[in-house]
Image: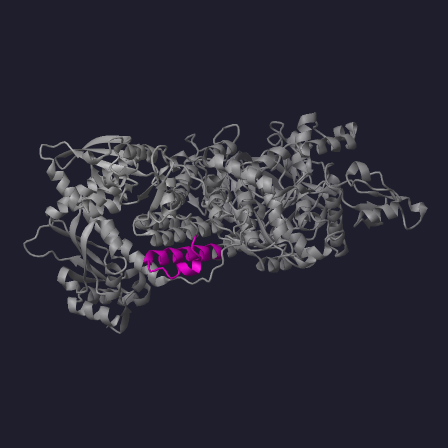
Amino acid sequence: MDDVCEGKDISFPAQELRVLQLWKAIDAFHEQLRRTEGGEEFVFYDGPPFATGLPHYGHILAGTIKDVVTRHQSMRGRHVSRRFGWDCHGLPVEFEIDKALGITNRQQVFDIGIAKYNETCRSIVTKYVSEWEAVVTRTGRWIDFKNDYKTMDINFMESVWWVFAQLWQKDLVYKGFKVMPYSTGCKTALSNFEAALDYRTVPDPAVMVSFPIVGDTDNAALVAWTTTPWTLPSNLALCVNANLTYAKVKDKSNAAVYIVAESRLGQLPVKVKASGKKQAPSKGSNAEAVQDGLDKESYELLAKIPGSSLVGLKYTPLFDFFMELQETAFRVIADNYVTDDSGTGVVHCAPAFGEDDHRVCLAAGIFEDKGRLVSKGSIEHSYPFCWRSGTPLIYRAVPSWFVKVEKIKDQLLECTKETYWVPEYVKEKRFHNWLEGARDWAVSRTRFWGTPLPLWMSQDGEEIVVMDSIEKLEKLSGVKVTDLHRHYVDDIKIPSKRGPEFGVLKRVDDVFDCWFESGSMPYAYIHYPFENKELFEKNFPGNFVAEGLDQTRGWFYTLMVLSTALFGKPAFKNLICNGLVLAEDGKKMSKSKKNYPSPTDLIDEYGADALRLYLINSPVVRAESLRFKRSGVYSVVKDVFLPWYNAYRFFVQNAKRLEVEGLAVFSPIDQASLLKSSNVLDHWINSATESLVSFVQQEMDAYRLYTVVPYLVKYIDNLTNIYVRLNRKRLKGRTGEEDCRISLSTLYYALVTTCVAMAPFTPFFTEVLYQNLRKVSNKSEESIHFCKFPSTTGERDERVEQSVNRMMTIIDLARNIRERHNKALKTPLKEMVVVHPDNEFLEDITGKLKEYVMEEINVKTVTPCNDPLVYASLRAEPNFSVLGKRLGKDMGKVSNEVKKMTQEHILAFEESGEVTFFGHCLKQDDIKVVRQFKRPENVSEKEIDAAGDGDVLVILDLRADQSLFEAGVAREVVNRIQKLRKTAQLEPSDPVDVYYKSVDHDKNTLGEILNSQDRYIRDALGSPLIPKEMAPMDVVLLAEESHDVHDMSFVICIARSCPVLSPDLLAHASGNNDHVEALRVYLLSRSLSRLKNQFQAGNGMIMVDCIEGYPPINLQLGKHIFLSAGDFYLASRS
């Protein structure tokens, strides 16, 4: 394995760029596809974005969700084709071209020619394709750009024709003349779901207009309320609700008589009083002046009228534009869509109007001149805007081709039930409600750049031919077809079947709504049914789709409508719906406002994996909004990647240390053998890793991506702060080589398994770690993404996991006591008592885990106590959250009895596991037993203190003695040495000797203390602490520092380890001092690690025969020569 740098020096973005080069070199994505070919198909539909703009965080979010799921499925052995798609047609493209060419009406398009206009559209469709590919690739998403699909490709368009032809054959298409949302900016009608894409709260004029009833004895007029006064010239009817009660009132100021819904009387304008002040109709008036919302000072109630009696009445229109329709128009009709929660209960109906009506009505005073304006004002309300041009929509009657959605609504609802959505409420609420109110879908657009409707119609409209293929068009027309856009097919004519006298059939002018094309994607992107027939029919519905919340009324809807209509099936099985990514202030991200960081800049700073995890771990994956924060991405680096990386670095350092020390190169022990390890933490981390893998698989099967990251963070915290931290001695080889290799192998498998399980989420980081880790394994794959997802039995060692959890509880409680008394962990304590009635609990703490507890708490002894009354008093409390619903009115009296339980009752309850009060049997979950510390007599809180969590009680003896003082000094000295090693930038594997020198008057005190703590110091440092006077004369110092600890002053020196010759060598060299000096010079010139390897190969002996002028000499390690001053010091002491 290669050396790895410190966490503070690692650049995750730079590492990601190297990974991208690796993937490119080995063609990783396509290699993964080749390896899974022939496996079970996992069909993923990628919704096509428009390439007329650059990708933003919303695209990166959706792309990340798709990439995580498809990578995971690939690692489960499934074949997942991933082709990028482009939405090429429709308003987004035309809108850009209209702006660029200054086009404001349809005639201008005809003037320049449809061919030129469409080819100009085609030229900008792929404007940002390269930028898209760069961003998508940089985020780590694997998807095929070379084999992409475009909705403007002839094969895609032909399949769209086929879809429409199937609908026609099923009698699900008709031409209608309906009031539709109309975009004045794009000059075309929109579908109802397009109208719902951009609602804004805006102020609009609000007017009440009178419509005199013909023949009414009181000359009464119906009062209609509207926020679109420009539609009034097109008024043809008034609509009321037959089930409402209406009131006829007289205006006392001018004798005018009005009819409005009784419940809306308060909306009539209040006239000026004698005082000259206006009075609000329903607020501030007294009860006598206002009755049923009517201001009695301004109006007189004449009669109450049922709504049904108004139906059929004729009224005088505002204008005489449509007088030729007066036999059927200008009468009152009824419908339940009229409500009494706004307006006057009378709705004005304008079945058709246009932009000219808008212009005419803007002329000031048009209604005042006629004396028909009852009131005017403004209202703030939610109003639909064009999702593309940003202009307010109007509603006008236009001819369109419709799909009969209402006819298949029940089937749509049933098909939706077969699908699985995350989150579920989007399906059950938002989507279900939309389907409940679904109306026929206008699929035609009076535009130019799109897939033409495949309808050829005779001039009299009696003969219609629907093309379901290019072959059919060529056969009927005799014309070779090479493109299906308007400028290629508009001029193609078909002879009438009825004979030449009926002329020819011409194509209708309209093109498809681009949503019809994207809804056809599951069929058109593989050119079904003309190609891939078996592939499609075996794997439909698709397995998975994912897009934003707005697509519930867009792509998700059109997919479902077409699949239901064509096949009676849903288009997909599983769906993830994400929410909106907003700026940090909660507003929409805006380029002009620059209220969000550039995605590319952010990736360059923190890396794509950090951005991926930040998005996946946010509410946005649950269809909620996310306020995007740069600091959130940094937190992922700090809280996830750095701890993960540091655990990996610690492993690499200690695995390589074996080589440095001249031992066999690290190779992981097989996992079957590791199961026999006697170390409890080995079993625990294996169980925890198994739990992680099981959890990831379970949650990915349920498409709950957002639950995985919190579980990963918890696992990494356990790996670094429990397994690695508590096993430092083992991993550093302080407990013997065999134990070291077992712990390193256990850590190796934990790291590799975690990386493989998390590879779909963090494809770069896991690849970086894996590429180094794989170097010690002979069976590793070329990329982590070629690995199979870890197999799991789902079995956990719950007993071990429980034991470690208990240990960490004890450690946390003990640390809490230390913090309260300002007792640093470096200060040893004499005893810790653990109080709990469960002997199994106590065996956990005082058995295999005892060593870890003692080291973490720095305590000399751990004493178990299973008699709670020795150190604690017991108190019982009812668990209100559990018992409240169950006991109801008995809760009070049962609660009192629980609180009255004596110590003996509580102990008996803990023994039996249940107790009964007033006929209610309470179990252990129903009662919480609280243990409160009972301090021994004549002992202060500063001497002995305790902490508990209501279950276990931990008691610490805080009193000091000489042995504890000496242990504390040793820990302080070791701490100073470790910090000096860091300052000197030494690696754990660097061979060094550590010296100390007392500068006190009494130099023996420090030496005696360090000698008494020699075992601890050697365990902590891996070598002894040597008096400075024993340093070799040619020692090379690497670092030196002065310190004061407990009024003792000393100097610490760290030197490079070097061979030390024994005094016995002189006699062995025949008393020749020159020979000994020559040997010293020679040995100092040798690499220490190579020298060590040479001694190992010679079973502790080497022969030196290369010194000119001196005879060969055999040197014995540990007798004639030592490889460090530390080894020599230990030998001389023994």
What residue span does the magenta drawing correspond to? 668-697
Residue at horizontal 6 percent and vertical 56 percent from the top: 937
Give percent across and percent down for residue 205: 55, 34
Q: Is residue 938 above or below residue 1027?
A: below
Question: Is there any visible trace of residue 851 in the rendered image?
Answer: yes
Q: Is residue 81 magenta?
A: no
In this rendering, position of residue 48 left or right of residue 285: right
In this rendering, position of residue 689 left or right of residue 306: left
In-front residue for pair 342/489:
489
Residue at the extreme bottom: 919
Q: Quadrant of residue 373?
A: top right
Give percent across and percent down for residue 864: 19, 61
In-front residue for pair 714/105:
714
Q: Quadrant of residue 275?
A: top left
Q: Work out which quarter of the rendered image holds the N terminus and state it.
A: top left
In this rendering, position of residue 638 left or right of residue 473: left
Question: Is there any visible trace of residue 389 in the rendered image?
Answer: no
Give percent across and percent down for residue 875: 18, 62
In-front residue for pair 930/611:
611
Give percent across and percent down for residue 437: 60, 52
In-front residue for pair 1094/376:
1094
Q: Is residue 696 magenta?
A: yes
